[in-house]
Amino acid sequence: MSKMVEIRWHGRGGQGAKTAALLLADAAFSTGKYVQGFPEYGPERMGAPITAYNRISGERFTIHSNIYEPDYVVVIDETLLSAVDVTKGLKESGAIIINSEKAPDQLRDKLKGYKGRVGVVDARKISEETLGRYFPNTPMLGAVVKVSEIMSEEEFIVDMESSFKHKFADKPHVIDGNMKAIKRSMQEVQIV
Amino acid sequence: MAIRDRLSGNEAVAHALKQIGPDVMAAFPITPSTEIPQYFSAYASNGEVDTEFVAVESEHSALSACVGVAASGGRAVTATSSCGLALMWEMLYVASSMRLPIVLAVVNRALTGPININNDHSDSMGARDSGWIQLYAENNQEVYDNTIMAYRIGEHPDVKLPVMACQDGFITSHGIENIELLESDKVTSFIGTFNPDVRLLNPKHPVSMGPYSNASYYMEWKCQQAYAMKQAKQVILDISKEYANISGREYGLFEEYKMEDAERAIVIIGSSAGTAKATVDSLREKGEKVGLIKIRVFRPFPMDELAKALGHVKAVAVMDKAESFSACGGPLFAETRSACYGIPNAPKMINYVYGLGGRDVHVGCIAHVYSDLEKIIKTGDIGETYRHLSVRE
Amino acid sequence: MKNDYVPIANFNELAGWKEIFPAGAVCEGGTAQLFNTGDWRTMIPSYAEEKCKHCMLCVPACPDASIPIKDGKRQDFDFKHCKGCGVCYKVCPFGAITLGKEDK
């Protein structure tokens, strides 16, 4: 992959959109890519809409701006669909991936006529069943890798495992749950 | 072999400082530079560095402590942003006039008001005349490299001046990017030891530093400082060359990007230079003769070199990420235009103040600037020289 | 530019900016001795040895350390540095110090 892939994350403060963008950058870096992972900063408030970004490319790049025409959009919180223009600039050749228990077709009418692919994964259910708490960002990470194919699933799983071992060195019990969450979301994501 | 990694700009600076191992870090937290002392204090408490970490009560105290350390013959470092730098103001002048090679990691952020935490260059541009060397970085790699070079530049006997190693708040400080790190032993041998010829803690040679000076001496000492800043230009080039030998990365006073046959150019500082390079690439694909100059060293200002680099260009836009409220343009514009004064067929020149308080600058914004330059060349009419980019009318 | 210690003797108002040490550092200790502040005097103390009990009250009171001591006894003033402030005259309990007009 030499072409640059650009991803925009929409979440609410506290849901881990920034962490997810940084983890994705980490994983893509491990597969030899050039990466950027960065949040759009403002006053940090729990629950307020926040945006984070990824650029991933096989070639070196220099651009330092927000992303206006993303290939993929990830929506970590379904309630943002009515609050934020999540499909703004989203390429029709790309996809939007939403955390929801609904089917993709049930969400389409909230996407302002977006004609590209719509992916859905129930990150709440997966998170609660694998981690025992609501941390939607890890399942969303699995879903976006599956849908965007920015790296092979096998490589991604190996990288995430080593990344979690590093990140959660002092709480190894959460590594298993996070890995299960990622694998399940990769299997369960529906894309139409 | 370089170590391939991915780090945020703040992580990169903290990592460079870990490899350098200054004697003292004195710092006070302020967004977006907070992470630098935060990471570094962890290294200090874990025993990964043999550095005394001083948690002071303000930025004024942080730099005061650094002045004490450097006057005593130690390597000192601090980090700050925005109003933190403003609170250091008095001590900035003390540090530079006492000729103390302190390194200050500046994570550029807008000055209030309205209160704003995002990036522009108003903090360090305000300090441009405080007698500090100023190095600016486009990305995480450059701020890592500049931080390592900063000690060598500042401590050089021909220079003996403090150095600000600046990067753009959030854009590079909090963004993760690929980076190549040096092995720590390479950094150690590059950095060497700091052996100032005069220091307070030397019982064999008692010395008084920072005394009062009246008019009969003051100008002589200011003249020394001015001379040191002139000398710094060659020292920066020499040390950058030496650094290239261990890193493979070459740095000058500024970087010329596709300038050889450029008819239109912009002059720019910091992270937006990367975005501008992407713009140049896409315009070049359409056959447009555009290029850019990215200023790395703003103090000392590379006046003659810049004039030479811009001599063949027809029109130039100078990009200022800081207002100077001079009513006639920003600081980089004033100096760039001054550099080109008197050269034959000097390029037509306009100023754009851009990106204040985190206003995002994307490829489209820069393309707009190049298209303005095209109009100027076609019509021969410069029009308004002092403009603001991406502002709602 | 010199980077070694510059002797204080090189400091004078005729020295060029390359001759004086960077940053105004004074590279010796006790350099106040080199300045003949006695020149500034308009009043001058004098000391009547026969009235002096060598109580030493005047010695620490002198702001210019201009009252030397030898073998436990105070000596005559160091007029190279005494500025004639008169503090010694005020503190002497025995009238051993008088203050008069300087007659240069």
Image (cartoon, coloured by chain):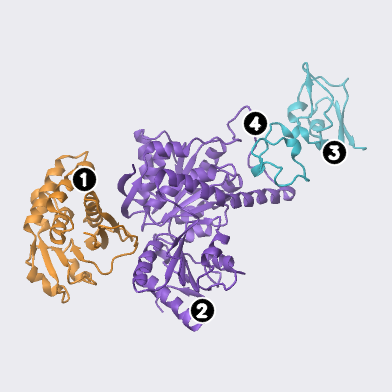
Against B357, residue B148 (above or below) is above
What residue did someone put label 2 on?
B384
What residue did someone put label 4 on?
B206
- SS at circle 1: helix
Mark 2 → mark 1, Cα distance in angstroms: 53 Å
Q: Amino acid at mark 4?
A: Pro
Of labels 4 and 2, the one closer to you: 2
What residue did someone put label 3 on?
C39
The chain displayed cyan equals C
Q: Chain of mark 3?
A: C
Left/right placement of residue B100 relative to residue B56 reads: right
Measured from the top left, where is residue A125 in percent x and y?
8, 56
What residue did someone put label 1 on?
A163
Residue B58 seen in render: no
Q: Amino acid at mark 1?
A: Ser
Of labels 4 and 3, the one closer to you: 4
Q: Amino acid at mark 3?
A: Asp
